[in-house]
Image (tube, rainbow, N blue to C red):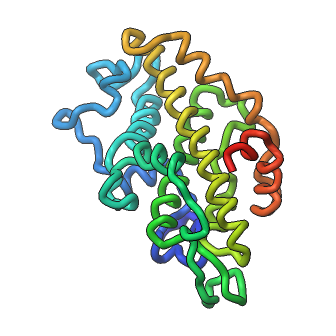
Amino acid sequence: MNASPPILLRFNEIVGLFDEPLHTSCRKFHFPYEPPNDKDPLSHYGVLSDGTFPNLSLEETDILRDVVIRWETRHTACPFGTRYDTIKAYATFFSENYYDHSSLTQIVPRPMSRYSSTCWSVRADTLMAVGHMSLGIVQILETLSGFWDPSMGSAFVLDPRFKFLQILEEHHDPSVSLLALQALQTRTSIAVKRINAYLRYLQMRYAPGEIDDSEAVESLYSTVSSERAIFGQESGEEELGKLLARPQYKLAI
């Protein structure tokens, strides 16, 4: 039995998502890293032969290794279908894909439903893929921002408390469902850039020959100030309204 709280309500038995730590999901959804037989996932980031980064302990290095495993290696539950096997690959596809009302389906109320009347959901395969992607991105960004800047109390969070994902699970208004999907696409695009920037920064520190230093620093800090506003305290619908007031989301949606 999973001790972490479920993320979804109605479909969680099918999707199987829990608000759990990154290392837990790494063990659950990815092949274990077993040295010396396996290539170190951090090999192209400048890790030393003893499996650590300079001036970092093995425990600290393992945190970064779990991030890279979660982002770049195959997801064993195969939630993204046959075309994509990593969170990174699916996130890039999802942020650029086109969705409209045909992406939604009507569902009838069930005992675990939040609504007593017919409502709307994204298709099951989309909910599965977006759910697993969202969980992974939230875990990765939380870990990276906490690792590099523990004082950053309001770092970018893809989907605070998974409120947009819960709208995708079921909502009585299909227009709200579609807006939540499109807003999540825009936020995923931002998240992908931030994760890649953090990892470029990692390369800059430990494998400087692999990357342009100025690009890494600029990418890492370019959106920090604009993303530190308080977000995630209201209902999913209210948070969606806040996003739609931002020019970036108006243009994207």
Residue that extends furthest to the left in the rendered view of this protein: 37
Q: Please determine whether, in this image, residue 203 is positioned above or below residue 131.
A: above
Q: Is residue 247 left or right of residue 143?
A: right
Task: Give me the residue at 53% from left, 26% from top.
Answer: 197
Q: Nearer the viewer, residue 226 or 41?
A: 226
Left or right position of 178 against 125: right
Residue 46 locus on image (x, y percent): 35, 18
Q: Residue at x 77, y 35 (%)?
A: 228
* Quarter of the image where one finds residue 187: top right
Q: Position of residue 98 (x, y in %)?
A: 53, 55
Up-down relation of residue 39 to residue 124 (above or below): above
Residue 11 position within the rendered picture, expressed as x and y whole percent measured from the top left:
53, 76
Q: Nearest the camera: 4 or 200?
A: 200
Identify which residue is drawn at 81% across, 55% down.
241
* x 71%, y 83%: residue: 115
Q: Nearer the viewer, residue 57 or 207?
A: 207
Q: How many marks?
A: 0
Lateral position of residue 250 relative to residue 84, left or right:
right
Instruction: Examine the rendered structure and indicate whether residue 196 appears above or below residue 97.
Output: above
Residue 57: x and y, percent? 44, 25
The foreground one among 183 and 26 is 183
